Image (cartoon, grey):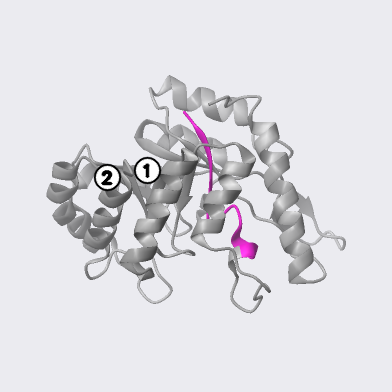
């Protein structure tokens, strides 16, 4: 297991709709951030879409990653059209062992049968390329439903990108999610969180914290993966709460990234 960052470590710095930063973080800038933090893996996902970059920029990114000693992993959102093929080619270009994918987009929420048939059709190419499709648990489906999807696809080249908090959207906490999905995990998103009751006591707020400072039991998480024989790269992601303005939020995000990497080094030395 190696510790890394991703484009969702720096969501605000890259840009959130309605909150434009003065100087958005680019893919090249993300690689520099990784080098500055002393991590060896960078996962570039759909908020920095690699498929929109010209070939010259992709080549420059590859050279930069090599010069900095960084391993690049690629990530996509959506499975319609030729998305899985496009990102397989990007994975091959960067030598990424996985392609992380979120199944849904804002305007396409495929039913289970469509998901299974689409992933199954993509598997021969992924198998030949020796790239594993890492399906992220994301909001809509329960952990058991994700397992059923993978079982029906029936390939060694499809697994889970395990996110530690996304399944709150399906009313599932980390314990049940990790225990169910650990045997299938090929990529890990470490995202820590806090839950607090609102001031008027009628409801709760779930929000992010620096890794190692919230409710996520990181040692237990890593032990659960190890018991299942899994040793994926661990990508730090953050849910940084908005501050008074976007630049203050970006500054907090940067501070949390540094704190998180420092905290996670207690358990992930690589």
Label placed on residue 150: 2
Residue 67 on image: x %, y %: 45, 43
Residue found 22% across the figure and 54% down from its top: 119
Residue 102 on image: x %, y %: 39, 58
- Contact, CB < 8 Å: mark 2 with mark 1? yes
Residue 82 on image: x %, y %: 22, 67
Give the structural element (helix, strand or loop) at label 2: helix
- Regarding residue 71, the answer to whether it shows in the image is no
Q: Quadrant of residue 58?
A: bottom left
Residue 29 on image: x %, y %: 56, 57
Q: Quadrant of residue 160?
A: top left
Indicate left or right for 267 with 243 as reference.
left
Task: Relative to 196, say whether 175 is above or below.
Answer: above
User: Which residue is at the front of the view, 73 or 81?
Assistant: 73
User: Which residue is at the front of the view, 68 or 264?
Assistant: 68
Residue matched to label 1: 160
Q: Quadrant of residue 66?
A: top left
Task: Relative to 252, say whether 67 is above or below.
Answer: above
Q: Earlier in the sequence, mark 2 or mark 1?
A: 2
Q: Which residues are magenta?
A: 1-13
Give the distance between the C-alpha atoms of the residues marked 2 and 1, in whole angstroms.
8 Å
Q: Residues within 10 Å of mark 1 (few under 14, many from 20)?
A: many
Q: Most extreme residue toward the bottom, as rendered?
A: 18
Mark nearest the camera among 2 and 1 is 1
Task: Relative to 52, say whether 71 is above or below.
Answer: above
Residue found 33% across the figure and 44% down from its top: 96
Give the structural element (helix, strand or loop) at label 1: strand
User: Which residue is at the front of the view, 28 or 15?
Assistant: 28
Residue found 59% across the figure and 76% down from its top: 17
Label placed on residue 50: none
């Amino acid at each position: 297991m190696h510790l890394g960052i991703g484009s969702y470590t720096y969501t605000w710095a890259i840009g959130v709709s309605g909150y434009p930063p003065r100087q958005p973080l680019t893919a090249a800038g993300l690689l520099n951030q990784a080098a500055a933090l002393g991590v060896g893996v960078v996962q570039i996902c759909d908020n920095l879409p690699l498929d929109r970059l010209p070939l010259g920029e992709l080549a420059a990114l590859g050279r930069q990653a090599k010069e900095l000693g960084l391993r690049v992993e690629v990530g996509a959102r959506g499975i319609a059209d030729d998305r899985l093929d496009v990102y397989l080619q990007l994975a091959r270009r960067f030598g990424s062992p996985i392609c992380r994918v979120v199944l849904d987009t804002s305007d396409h929420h495929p039913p289970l049968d469509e998901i299974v048939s689409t992933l199954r059709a993509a598997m021969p190419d992924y198998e030949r390329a020796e790239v594993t499709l890492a399906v992220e648990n994301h909001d809509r489906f329960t952990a058991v439903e994700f397992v059923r999807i993978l079982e029906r696809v029936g390939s060694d080249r499809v697994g889970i990108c395990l996110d530690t908090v996304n399944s709150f959207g399906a009313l599932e906490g980390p314990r049940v999610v990790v225990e169910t999905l650990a045997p299938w995990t090929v990529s890990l998103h470490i995202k820590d969180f806090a839950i607090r009751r609102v001031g008027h006591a009628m409801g709760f707020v779930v929000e992010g914290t620096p890794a190692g400072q919230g409710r996520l039991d990181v040692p237990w998480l890593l032990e659960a993966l190890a018991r299942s024989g899994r040793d994926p790269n661990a990508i730090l992601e953050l849910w940084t709460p908005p501050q008074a303005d976007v630049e203050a939020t970006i500054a907090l995000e940067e501070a949390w990234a540094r704190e998180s990497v420092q905290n996670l080094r207690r358990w992930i030395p690589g």
